[in-house]
Amino acid sequence: MRIRKRKDGRWEKRYIGSYHPDGKPQYKSIYATSYAEVKNKYKLLLNGNTKKEPATILSVERLCILWLEDIKITVKESTYSNYYGMIHNHIIPYFKDMKTKQLTNDKINSFIKEKTLNGRLDGNGGLSPKTVNDMTAVLKEIIQYGIDNDYLSGITTAFKKPKTTVKTLSVLSSPGSTPMI
């Protein structure tokens, strides 16, 4: 969340203070008379607060959003937009009500199979193997982020990928020239 100036002249920083039992965030605010003061108060709060969200209540949707927030400043805007669309159009709807503790390699393999067979948003068939492979790579990054930050355990990033085919290109020659072999 960003720091903003309120109509009453104070500066405010909103942040997630804790989580409800259902996994939804509960927001808190820091107020001060200057931008720098709010920023310093927030830094002090972060340094003193190492409490993480328990993996038992963290949803897959929330994990995806945390990962998106984490990578936002490290990737190009177009890459972020691509990841955002992939996550919100495919990954979150599939794992909507699942908690991270319920995530298994079998469920991820089922997701990959489902997207290969019936993944198009218009309902007319599956996605291309390359698109599913891209989705799998993003899901692998999210899972690794969850493992690194103690949100996930007991899961590996070794799951099946759809088979891709390599197209062969034919060499064109101009009329009257000998074809190159």
Image (cartoon, rainbow, N blue to C red):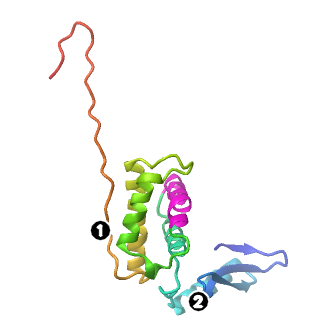
Q: Position of residue 16 (x, y in %)?
A: 62, 82
Magenta residue check for 122: no
**x 53%, y 66%: residue:** 92
Instruction: Note whether residue 72 is visible.
Output: no
Residue 41 falls left or right of residue 71 = right
Disc ID at residue 69 = none
What's the residue type where badge 1 is placed? Answer: Ala
Residue at the spot of label 1: 158
Mark 1 or 2: in front is 1
In this picture, which residue range is highlighted in magenta?
76-94
Q: Residues within 10 Å of mark 2 (few under 14, many from 20)?
A: few
Residue nearest the observer in this picture, 73 or 135: 135
Residue at disc 2, secondary structure = helix
Callout 1: helix, strand or loop? Answer: loop
**What secondary structure characterizes most of the magenta part?**
helix
Vertical side of 164 occupied by 2: above or below: below
- What residue occupies the far left of the structure in this picture? 181
Outermost residue to the right? 8
| Left-right relation of 76 to 166 | right
Give amino acid for label 2. Answer: Leu
Q: Which residue, given by chain and number where applicable, does mark 2 sit on? A: 45
Q: CA distance from mark 1 to mark 2?
A: 37 Å
Q: Residue at x 73, y 85 (%)?
A: 31
Residue 38 placement: quadrant: bottom right
Viewer-nearest residue: 152 or 3: 152
Q: Earlier in the sequence, mark 1 or mark 2?
A: 2
Whole-percent x, y for residue 19 in the image: 60, 86
